[in-house]
């Protein structure tokens, strides 16, 4: 189990849990980052932050600090 | 309530009202535009700065009013946008009639996430039409959707559209009528039994206490949104112990291992995935879309920054240069109107009011219009094609240093041309604190109105030294420094505001990166038009009033009828093409200018300037500069014309004017020392770099924040900074250079 910011480029993981119940975590969950969703790391901004992920058919941008709330298991 | 009564009378009794809701980036604006065309009004909901957009169309059976609600991912009512949306959908918004149906628009190639909002909306119990938009893109995304199957499972009528190509619009209009005629099916229960029991207990308790049962949707919001808007609303309605009651209910739910608020997203996404099984299928191997290929360059480590810089340069350049001919045109029209008034009216106070106050005042608003149009054309194009989200992505890291997010970059960048469109552009920032902070520092960016002041002072008082064979000129370096000064000062200002005034974590950056699309010219044109109308109507009237006020303060009470008599004589002589009268005109002109200078000195404004002289002495200024600063409250560049008038040169001078520069160089204190030294010139420039002498900006802040508090704050903090800055410049400059 790792957090989303540690996911290597091109890798996908399956979401286990989104930590916290503040507005940011809620927004993530409302946008489909819930238990069982597959998330792939597809890129990052030129200055290294934020990161870009592919989530159920769309692209999501998250700062590293926000990606740390999401726990995933890496898929082989 | 009066609002709803008038609007239903406006459109007749047979009219119905529907609302359009959907996630951001689903083509909702295109759909609204395809339904209503330019037949739309934009305003604000009372008391909040949420944009209220209402249009209408006639489908043959009668008029249909369409309310375009702000794009949102959920109805959990955390942001002002979401709160207003919930109020409108529940019929609680007093200025909107109750809804007959709700149209939920979803991006067909991203259906899973989009159905989350749908699953919330359908629990409101109103007739619903589900629109799968961007249908033309579904096939090349490698997605197949079994429409009849999906329609049967969801239990609501379903329409496919490609709104930017206007496909499927007529069918949508027919389906809306059909949906209203048929009563909506009861929404299915998605939540587990223990949760439903808790909700029903809550509903019973509120019914018992208040006499009327709360809708199921609101009961859900009470339980799910911890210290949410709905809760504070019911507390005010006479349920002061509601928070304790909710806390207890939540504790009991936690005991039966239901985690709040995560249960909602779990349950809804679980339901959505079940509905989509065997209905939506994707290619096993995800396709690399054109959008992905473009993004490899646009968000590339190196080329991404180059592309960003190039696009920003293009916008900045366009505002600075394309607007110039249009601005000149507006000024020419303004002048010719002034001239025709001059030709038809005898000189007098009324003519002066019309030319200097009314035409001058309205003109000072309209000259901003070309810049606003060009900026919003670019913003519209960039937003609609999907680049705006990339710009925020690229710039976010730098902007977090200021306590802002990437979304603030474009508004601040635009403010280098003019803060008015820059502040209007902050509407793309949905976090209200983030947006407010951006608005408060935007006026510090060096706008084009500061340039005339800089040019006048630099050319008159900065030595024309140069190095490297003329490639590096001291005057140009000073100009560049002043262009950058405001942005540098904005860094500690933003930090301080964030620290003491708007404390909190830096705004989050959870954002969707939409696919690139070819921008719809209709949508872009409609947006540019809306902004232009809003600007001219609302800010325009207020700026106009301010300009007339300043005119009156400079004109009264020392009105000298002799000035108008001289004007009449000059005009009479000028109308006769004789060389002989030229010298006479010159003498009369000088006489008139001397009288006008007297008039200004003895006007309310002039007296005020002299009374504040002790306060501006430490900045190295005399009362004339003080009057110039006071008179330039409507717009910074006015100081050039005012100094010209005061120094008896007549009102019509510009910064290139050699005589004005010479006059300033020759101006003396009573004891014979020159008024203008290099430190004085620099002190004036620093003051104008940091001050808030721009009525248009302050009034736009008032409009965008819906309160006088923030323009007042901006004015006070900027004027304080400007005063301190000018004082330091003069004192240090004098100590260093000598007087």
Image (cartoon, rainbow, N blue to C red):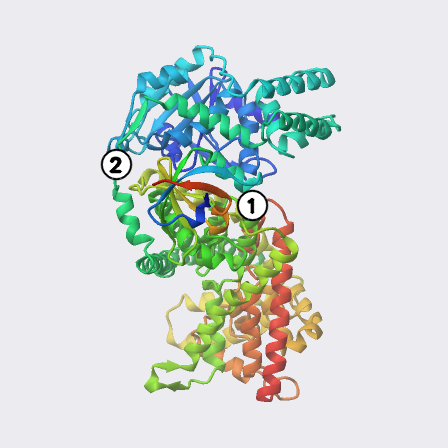
Q: Look at the picture and state if B594 lies above or below B567.
A: below
Q: Position of residue B9 (x, y in %)?
A: 53, 21
Q: Secondary structure at mark 1?
A: helix
Splitting the image into 4 quarters, where does residue B432 fall? top right
Q: Look at the picture and state if B398 lies above or below B83.
A: below
Residue located beneath label 2 in the image: B285
Q: Chain of mark 1?
A: B
Splitting the image into 4 quarters, where does residue B691 fall? bottom right
Q: Nearer the viewer, mark 2 or mark 1?
A: 2
Q: The C terminus of chain B is located in which quarter? A: bottom right
Q: Secondary structure at mark 2?
A: loop
Q: CA distance from mark 2 to mark 1?
A: 41 Å
Residue B332 or B194: which is nearer the viewer? B194
Q: Position of residue B258 (x, y in %)?
A: 58, 27
Splitting the image into 4 quarters, where does residue B606 fall? bottom right
Q: The N terminus of chain B is located in which quarter? A: top right
Where residue B432 is drawn, which disc sits there?
Answer: 1
Q: In the image, B376: left or right of B199?
A: left
Q: Chain of mark 2?
A: B
Where residue B493 is drawn, which disc sits there?
Answer: none
Q: Position of residue B685 (x, y in %)?
A: 53, 73
Q: Look at the picture and state if B199 lies above or below B453.
A: above
Tell me which residue sits at (62%, 67%) in the image. Answer: B721
Asked whether residue B536 appears in the rendered view, the answer is no
Q: In the image, B492: left or right of B16?
A: right
Q: Residues within 10 Å of mark 2 (few under 14, many from 20)?
A: few
Q: Do tags 2 and 1 sit on the same chain? A: yes
Q: Position of residue B186 (x, y in %)?
A: 50, 13
Residue B437 or B652: which is nearer the viewer? B437
Tell me which residue sits at (34%, 84%) in the image. Answer: B470
């Amino acid at each position: 189990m790792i957090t989303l910011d540690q996911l290597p480029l091109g890798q996908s993981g399956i979401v286990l849990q989104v930590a916290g119940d503040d507005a940011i975590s809620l927004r993530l969950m409302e946008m489909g980052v819930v238990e069982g969703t597959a998330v792939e790391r597809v890129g990052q901004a030129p200055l290294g932050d934020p990161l870009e992920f592919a989530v159920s058919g769309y692209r999501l941008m998250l700062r590293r600090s926000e990606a740390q709330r999401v726990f995933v298991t890496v898929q082989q | 309530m009066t609002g709803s009564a008038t609007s239903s009378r406006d459109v007749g009794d047979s009219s119905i009202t529907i609302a359009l809701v959907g996630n951001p980036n689903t083509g909702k604006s295109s759909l609204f535009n395809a339904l209503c065309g330019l037949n739309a009004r934009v305003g604000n909901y009372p008391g909040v700065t949420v944009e209220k957009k209402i249009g209408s169309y006639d489908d043959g059976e009668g008029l249909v009013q369409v309310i375009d609600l702000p794009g949102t991912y959920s109805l959990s009512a955390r942001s002002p946008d979401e709160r207003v949306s919930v109020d409108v959908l529940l019929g609680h918004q007093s200025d909107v009639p109750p809804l007959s149906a709700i149209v939920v628009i979803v991006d067909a190639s991203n259906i899973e996430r989009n159905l989350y909002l749908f699953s919330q909306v359908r629990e409101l119990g109103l007739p619903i039409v589900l629109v799968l938009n961007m249908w033309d893109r579904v096939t090349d995304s490698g997605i197949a959707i079994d429409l009849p199957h999906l329609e049967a499972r969801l239990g609501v009528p379903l329409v496919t559209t490609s709104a930017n190509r206007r496909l499927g619009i007529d069918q949508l209009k027919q389906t809306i009528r059909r949906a209203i005629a048929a009563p909506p099916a009861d929404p299915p229960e998605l939540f587990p039994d223990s949760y439903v029991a808790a909700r029903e207990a809550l509903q019973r308790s509120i019914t018992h206490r208040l006499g009327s049962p709360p809708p199921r949707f609101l009961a859900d919001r009470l339980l799910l949104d911890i210290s949410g808007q709905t809760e504070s609303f019911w507390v005010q309605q006479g349920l002061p112990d509601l928070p304790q009651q909710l806390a207890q209910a939540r504790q009991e739910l936690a005991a039966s291992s239901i985690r709040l608020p995560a249960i909602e997203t779990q349950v809804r996404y679980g339901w959505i995935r079940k509905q989509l099984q065997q209905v939506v299928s994707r290619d096993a191997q995800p396709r690399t879309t054109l959008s992905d290929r473009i993004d490899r360059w646009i968000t590339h480590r190196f080329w991404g920054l180059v592309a960003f810089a190039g696009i920003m340069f293009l916008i900045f350049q366009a505002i600075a240069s394309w607007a110039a001919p249009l601005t000149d045109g507006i000024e020419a029209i303004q002048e010719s109107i002034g001239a025709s008034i001059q030709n038809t009216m005898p000189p007098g106070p009324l003519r002066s009011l019309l030319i200097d106050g009314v035409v001058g005042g309205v003109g000072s608003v309209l000259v901003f219009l070309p810049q606003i149009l060009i900026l919003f054309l670019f913003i519209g194009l960039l937003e609609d094609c999907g680049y705006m989200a990339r710009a925020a992505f690229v710039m976010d890291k730098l902007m977090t240093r200021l306590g802002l997010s990437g979304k603030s970059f474009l508004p601040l960048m635009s403010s280098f041309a003019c803060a008015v469109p820059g502040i209007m552009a902050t509407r793309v920032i949905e976090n209200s604190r983030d947006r407010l902070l951006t608005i408060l520092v935007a006026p510090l960016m060096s706008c084009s109105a500061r340039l005339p002041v800089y040019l006048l002072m630099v050319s008159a008082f900065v030595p024309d030294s140069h190095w490297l064979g003329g490639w590096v000129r001291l005057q140009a370096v000073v100009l560049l420094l002043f262009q950058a000064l405001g942005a540098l000062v904005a860094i500690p200002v933003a930090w301080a505001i964030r620290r003491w005034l708007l404390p909190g974590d830096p705004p989050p950056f959870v954002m969707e990166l939409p696919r690139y699309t070819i921008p719809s010219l209709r949508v872009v044109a409609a947006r540019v038009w809306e902004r232009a109308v809003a600007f001219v109507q609302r800010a325009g009237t207020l700026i106009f009033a301010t300009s007339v006020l300043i005119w009156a303060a400079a004109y009264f009470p020392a009105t000298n009828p002799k000035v108008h008599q001289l004007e009449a004589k000059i005009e009479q002589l000028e109308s006769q093409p004789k060389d002989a009268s030229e010298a006479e005109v010159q003498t009369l002109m000088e006489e008139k200018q001397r009288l006008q200078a007297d008039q200004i000195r003895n006007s309310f404004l002039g007296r005020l300037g002299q009374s504040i002289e002790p306060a501006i002495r430490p900045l190295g200024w005399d009362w004339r500069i003080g009057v110039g600063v006071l008179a330039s409250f409507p717009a910074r560049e006015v100081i050039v014309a005012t100094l010209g008038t005061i120094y008896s040169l007549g009102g019509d001078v510009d910064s290139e004017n050699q005589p004005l520069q010479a006059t300033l160089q020759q101006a003396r204190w009573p004891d014979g020392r020159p008024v203008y030294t290099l430190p004085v010139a620099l002190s004036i420039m620093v003051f104008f770099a940091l001050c808030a002498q721009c009525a248009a900006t302050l009034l736009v802040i008032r409009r965008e924040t819906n309160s006088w508090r923030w323009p007042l704050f901006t004015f006070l903090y900027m004027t304080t900074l400007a005063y301190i800055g000018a004082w330091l410049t003069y004192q240090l400059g004098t100590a260093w250079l000598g007087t």
